[in-house]
Amino acid sequence: MKKMLTILLILFGFVLTGCHTSTEANQFKLKNNTFWIATDIHFIAPSLHDDGKEFQFIKGTAAGKDLDYQEESLTAFVAKAKKVKPAAIILTGDLTLNGEKQSAKEMAEILAPVKKTGTKILAIPGNHDIFDGWARKYQGDTKERIAQISPTDFKEFFPDGYKLATSTDSESLSYAIKIDKKYDFIFLDTNEYPIQTSRAQPHTGGQVKDETLNWLEKRLQIAESKNKVPILFMHHNLFIHNPLVYKGYVLSNAQTLKSLLAKYQVPVVFSGHIHAQDIMKDPTGKTDITEVVTSSFAIADHAYGELKLTPGKISYHRQTVDVDAWAKENKMTAKNIRQHNAYLKELFFKDGQRLAYQQLLDQNVRDENILAPAAKLVGEVNYNYFTGQDDYSSKKREQIKQSFAYKELGKYSPFLQKYIDSAINDTNLADQKLVIKP
């Protein structure tokens, strides 16, 4: 089935604008050297759900994502952007919950005010965005299939990147933009989606098609010929960021892409998909490529990356949206808005606890004296890992490994203990900041 899908994609391609290479007139009109990067927003339009039984179920399986106050958090994000006026907001996929066309439309409308200040919206889709068979409207005890986002729809709702593109790929939604005399941005569509409306769940995995790799190499060759530094943005991951959780997250042809990027000295790749904040240099040590994964905007603590470019430096700093302050400024009274940061943390913390309870109950552990501390440990470590606050000292790691909760997890859930190990033994770069001198 997968081979047939690949053949169909090659034969029919996409009904896009076709591959083109434009003149230097498409150079990005840079207001400043600051760009914001947000990913995995998973927005579902408020018009597509009430608070009925079906949507309650969806929230219960949302892995700690906030689905109740998305419009408010995005509006707070926009308000901050209007003040700072970054050159562009870069969205690296999974913009919608499950590819609902209405969600993309309403999200574009929420973001629109920043465009009036001159900030561009540069988007690339994720595996949940294009022809997702899970697109639904939830009302009471029922759910119904609704219109899905097509490649054409995506370009209609998020047109800035395609209008500014010096080149677009005819086989995907990839495009390239000239930023200034020093840098080029390349937005790579790494998703495997059908060419028409689907009834299937979104495909988690990703790859870069051969035709798109050829397109990419031409862009890299041009950049090299002009002594430009190319920076890559995509949804799926280039490296394995967690030894336990990587299948379906890392590109199936990651090695091929890595070799190509190394050949043309691409210094940094920005991605999403795994929802966790993580910065990693090529673990093999064979290239100088660094991958930055910004944590999902949908989870605690509504993070985004601030990318700054100067001729001699590429810097990245994880930032967050203070919805509490925005709510106070706008005289909002709802508790989960006025105390949104605490609400987000509790929501995500409880999801980690739920995972621990589920695993231990499956092993017939019923003693609350075991369940409660084990769940608390998993919740805390999980929160720190996903928000990039997992820079544990050797002393703290040893304290965790000597704790009662850790030892009980080893008895009843070796997987969760290994997960704790993978999180507290993260030897990657500091996950909040990065400076590269290209």
Image (cartoon, rainbow, N blue to C red):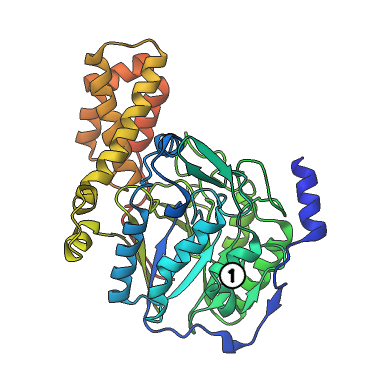
The quadrant holding residue 199 is top right
The quadrant holding residue 333 is bottom left
* Quadrant for the C terminus in the image: bottom left
- The image shows residue 287 at horizontal and vertical percentages of 52, 57
**At x 76% / y 50%, what residue is drawn?**
6
Nearer the observer, 120 or 27: 120
* Quadrant for the N terminus in the image: top right
> How many residues crowd around disc 1 within 10 Å: few (fewer than 14), some, or many (20 or more)?
some
In this image, 270 relative to 366: left or right?
A: right
- The image shows residue 23 at horizontal and vertical percentages of 64, 87
Outermost residue, bottom direction? 25
Q: How many marks?
A: 1
Amino acid type shown at disc 1? Glu
**At x 70% / y 56%, what residue is drawn?**
209
- The image shows residue 77 at horizontal and vertical percentages of 32, 64
**At x 42% / y 15%, what residue is drawn?**
362
Nearer the observer, 286 or 98: 98
In this image, 32 relative to 330: left or right?
A: right
- The image shows residue 18 at horizontal and vertical percentages of 72, 72
The residue to which callout 1 is attached is 156
Residue 221 visible in image: no
Residue 225 visible in image: yes
Nearer the observer, 261 or 16: 16
In this image, 19 relative to 231: left or right?
A: right
In this image, 11 relative to 388: left or right?
A: right
**At x 28% / y 36%, what residue is drawn?**
349
Q: Is residue 58 above or below residue 197?
A: above
Q: Is residue 9 above or below residue 32?
A: above
Q: Tag 1's secondary structure?
A: helix
